[in-house]
Amino acid sequence: MSTPEAMRKQIRREAQDILKKFSASLESVSFREKPLGDKGGGYRREGNGASTDERFKEIMFENAPNKQEDVILAEKKSW
């Protein structure tokens, strides 16, 4: 039976081998830029973003049942 330290070293070597093989396989992948069109895909051009209602934040906080200062408190996985 191997010691815990020997097992860690073996796992570390195996992980390094896997990463080396993976990175070597990524070297053969080629990326090309696709122009944007009606079909979508490719890279998007960054813009200034959409404009929103200036009262959006105020309205959101008015509708939030639980809030604390500048944060809306919400339940997590309660359903």
Image: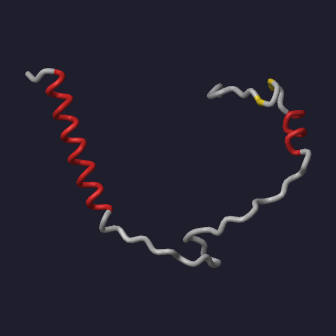
| Residue at 80% across, 30% down | 70
On the image, the x and y values in percent for residue 23 come to: 30, 56
Instruction: Give the total of numbered labels.
Output: 0
Q: In this image, 75 relative to 54: left or right?
A: left
Instruction: Choose top left, top right, bottom left or bottom right for residue 2.
Output: top left
Q: What colour scheme was applied to this rendering of the protein?
A: secondary structure
Instruction: Choose top left, top right, bottom left or bottom right for residue 49.
Output: bottom right
| Residue at 22% across, 36% down | 12
Above or below — where is 40 with respect to 2?
below
Q: In this image, 46 relative to 28: left or right?
A: right
Instruction: Choose top left, top right, bottom left or bottom right for residue 48.
Output: bottom right
Above or below — where is 47 with respect to 67?
below
Above or below — where is 17 with respect to 9?
below
On the image, the x and y values in percent for residue 20 come to: 24, 52
On the image, the x and y values in percent for residue 69 come to: 82, 26
| Residue at 57% across, 69% down | 43
Q: Quadrant of the N terminus?
A: top left
Above or below — where is 28 with respect to 72?
below
Q: Quadrant of the C terminus?
A: top right
Which residue occupies the extreme left position in the image?
1
Q: In this image, 41 relative to 66: left or right?
A: left
On the image, the x and y values in percent for residue 5 come to: 17, 24
